[in-house]
Image (spheres, rainbow, N blue to C red):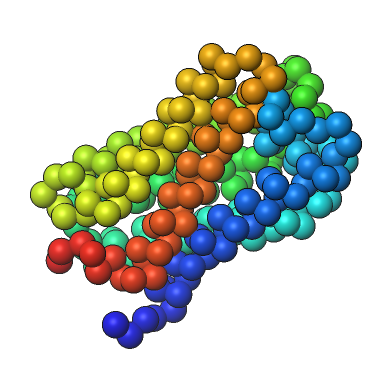
Amino acid sequence: MKRKLIHWLGLTGLLAFLSYTAAVVVSPAAYPGYDWAAQAVSDLSAETAPSRILWDRLAAFYGVGSVVCATCASVFVSEKKISTGLFRSGIHLFAGMNWVSAVGYKMFPLADAGKEIASFREAMHIAVTALVVLLSIASLVLLIAAGFGRGGARGIGVCAAAALALMAVGSVGTALVPPRYFGIAERFSVFSAVGFNAALGLHLFNGFRSIPR
């Protein structure tokens, strides 16, 4: 297969995953007293967090790469009429989720790490999170249905099912585990969408060849 630019742009999803992983793993070194097992990932990028500068550098490619990858996948499956309308709708919703995440969190960042939500901006941060979660669930459910339906997109369906399972484990876990383990449970959720974007990017890199035309 002769790859075009849009295929190569699929690799931005993998690079975004590596960028985000590096930020999550390395940034705590610049945050004295940060307890990764108990604290949320978003505490590392809060405006007053001592790790903010390091986070911004390490995660520089995360936001851009995720949006580019998901958007290119959305354009590709639409133009090539990949699989079914249900499948393409799932990809479009996932791309929309990445745009909401990239723009929303830049507009409404957390002001203080670990602080109780009180201001309008912090409330909007939570609203953005809720919308991101809803769009993520909706897109993954559509892709699971399409993957195990007649469209033949089983590979994407399996990846979507794995991502949704991780998201569910994270959501349930944060509500059930003791506070000292909140950060561990939360990381299942935050890595679910980033990981799925990487898988989606690899499918785009290969031109979604595993899906019957």
- Residue 187 percent coordinates (x, y): 58, 35
Q: Is residue 153 above or below residue 140?
A: below
Residue depicted at 15% across the width and 53% down the height = 151
The outermost residue toward the left is 150
Q: Quadrant of the C terminus?
A: bottom left
Callout count: 0
As displayed, is residue 117 above or below residue 196? above
Across and down, in percent, residue 30 comes to 86, 45
Q: Is residue 131 above or below residue 19?
A: above
Q: Residue at x 54, y 16 (%)?
A: 175
Is 130 positioned to the left or the right of 155 in the image? Answer: right
* Residue 101 location, quadrant: top right
Q: Residue at x 83, y 45 (%)?
A: 29
Name the image quarter holding the N terminus: bottom left
**In this orientation, which residue lies closer to the viewer: 90 or 52?**
52
The reply to whether residue 131 is in sight is no
> On the picture, is 213 further left or further right than 192?
left
In which image quadrant can residue 124 be found? top right
| Residue 37 seen in this snapshot | yes
* Rendered residue at 69%/29% (across/down): 37
**158 or 201: nearer the eye?**
158
Left or right: residue 205 compared with residue 126 = left
Is 121 or 194 nearer to us in this picture? 194
Residue 89 picture location, percent across and down: 29, 47
Residue 46 rendering spot, x and y as whole percentages: 77, 37
